[in-house]
Image (spheres, rainbow, N blue to C red):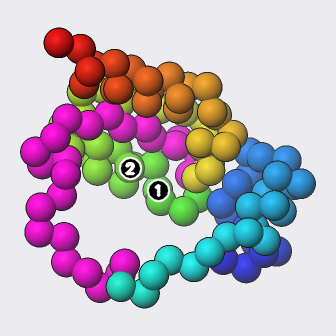
Amino acid sequence: MKQDKFHESFAQDLSPEEALVMAVTQKAPLGSTFGDTVTAPAWRSKPCWYQVSAADRMIHPDDERRMAERMKPRKVIELDAGHASLASQPVPVTDLIEEAALALSAP
């Protein structure tokens, strides 16, 4: 992504400085990512949890909600966050991950 558009498009809820660090250190995805066929997505056979970024400018939040619905997650949380929600909202994202890990490790 172009560095001058990164903050407004990808990480609008981070400070300009934080977004700049992310912009200059970003790596392009492998080209095969867009052509590989997924035959058995993990969410079809494993429990999942889902976080929707309600202010996402990269993936429309309605599309995120549809993806979550399709996965039938055990829990969905919705955050007022952009695409970089892990960086802008680390506590609720971490809480969701911890909840998932504890649920899976419980006897």
Which residue is nearer to you in this view: 54 or 17? 17
Residue lying at the far top in this picture: please name it: 107
Q: Position of residue 29 (x, y in %)?
A: 50, 77
Residue nearest the viewer, comparing 28 with 59: 28
Q: Is residue 58 left or right of residue 9?
A: left
Reply yes or no: does residue 2 show up in magenta: no
Q: Is residue 51 left or right of residue 16?
A: left
Q: Quadrant of residue 19?
A: bottom right
Helix, strand or loop at mark 2: helix
**Residue assigned mark 1:** 60
Disc 1 secondary structure class: loop
Q: What is the span of residues highlighted in magenta in the rendered image? A: 33-56
Amino acid type, label 1: His
Q: Amino acid at mark 2?
A: Glu
Q: Position of residue 40 (x, y in %)?
A: 12, 61
Residue 22 horizontal/vertical position (percent)? 74, 61
Q: Are marks 2 and 1 in contact (CB under 8 Å)?
A: yes
Q: Check disc 2: other Cα within 10 Å, few if <14, some if 14-19, many if 20+.
A: some
